[in-house]
Image (tube, rainbow, N blue to C red):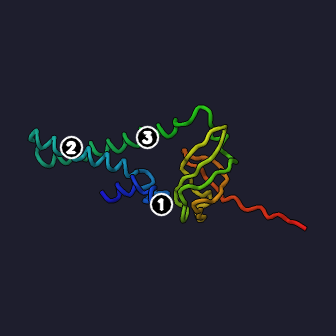
């Protein structure tokens, strides 16, 4: 429950519950998918108990329904992320655009930026293009590319003006 609350309200306090893993379970399964699967697991267990199935059969059915629920959740939300886009703003419109960090990205973690592109102001998820970079709230960034709806950004270096 604590993880779900932190995930839901973490942005209000600049708190991040994501992992830095590019592989393993958490690269494939989100907290919301685990919650959905656990809910289906529990409901299936209740239903199999209610109809009077043996305990082992109930556990097997509940595990299968929970796993199918996780797979369905990932498929549905993956499809939604891939097809989600404004009809006016394309990824190529975002590449090279400058934005303002509104949720910091310490240690290469995901944050959020606000960017003006194609005449629209967008708030979008972002990560540093280089995993070792840390980007603070208020920093100006340049979008290098967009991958899966997440902007990969680099800090905009201050231009030093040489004057006489």
**SS of the residue under disc 3:** helix
Q: Earlier in the sequence, mark 1 or mark 3?
A: 1
Tell me what residue is drawn at x 79 percent, y 64 percent.
160
Residue 89 sits above or below residue 27 on the image: above
**In the image, residue 67 lies at what x, y percent?**
31, 45
- Asked whether 142 or 53 is in front, the reply is 142
Residue nearest the observer in this picture, 159 or 30: 159
Q: Furthest-bottom residue in view?
A: 164
Q: Which residue is tagged 2?
A: 43
Outermost residue on the top side: it is: 87
Sequence-earlier tag: 1 or 2? 1
Q: Point out residue 6 in the picture as x, y percentages from the top left corner.
A: 38, 58
Q: Nearer the viewer, mark 1 or mark 3?
A: 1
Q: Which residue is mark 3?
A: 77
Q: How far apart in space, not on screen, are marks 1 and 2 (Cα)? A: 34 Å
Mark 2 neighbour class, 10 Å CA radius: few under 14, some 14 to 19, many 20 or more: some
Q: Residue at x 30, y 46 (%)?
A: 37
Left or right: 44 in relation to 141: left
Residue 20 position (above or below residue 76):
below
Q: Determine whether label 1 and label 3 are within 8 Å by CB.
A: no
Q: Of the residues under marks 2 and 3, which one precedes in the sequence?
A: 2
Residue depicted at x 41% and y 38%: 76
Check disc 1 and report the residue beneath it: 14
Q: Which image quarter is the C terminus in?
A: bottom right
Identify the residue shown where x is 39% and y is 52%.
8
Residue 133, position as x, y percentages in the image: 60, 64
Q: Residues within 10 Å of mark 1 (few under 14, many from 20)?
A: few
């Amino acid at each position: 429950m604590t993880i779900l609350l932190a995930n839901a309200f973490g942005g209000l306090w600049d708190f991040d519950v994501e992992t830095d893993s590019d592989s393993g379970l958490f690269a494939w399964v989100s907290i919301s998918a685990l919650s959905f699967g656990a809910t289906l697991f529990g409901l299936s267990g209740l239903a199999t108990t209610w109809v009077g199935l043996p305990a082992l059969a109930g556990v097997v059915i509940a595990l299968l329904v929970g796993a199918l629920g996780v797979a369905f959740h990932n498929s549905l939300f993956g499809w939604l992320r891939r097809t989600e886009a404004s009809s006016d703003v394309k990824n190529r419109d975002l590449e090279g655009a400058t934005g303002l960090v509104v949720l910091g990205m310490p240690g290469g973690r995901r944050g959020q930026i606000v960017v003006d592109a194609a005449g629209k102001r967008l708030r979008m998820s972002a990560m540093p293009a280089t995993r070792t970079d840390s980007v603070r709230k208020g920093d100006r960034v340049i979008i290098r590319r967009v991958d899966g709806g997440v902007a990969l950004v680099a800090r905009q270096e201050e231009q030093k003006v040489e004057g006489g």
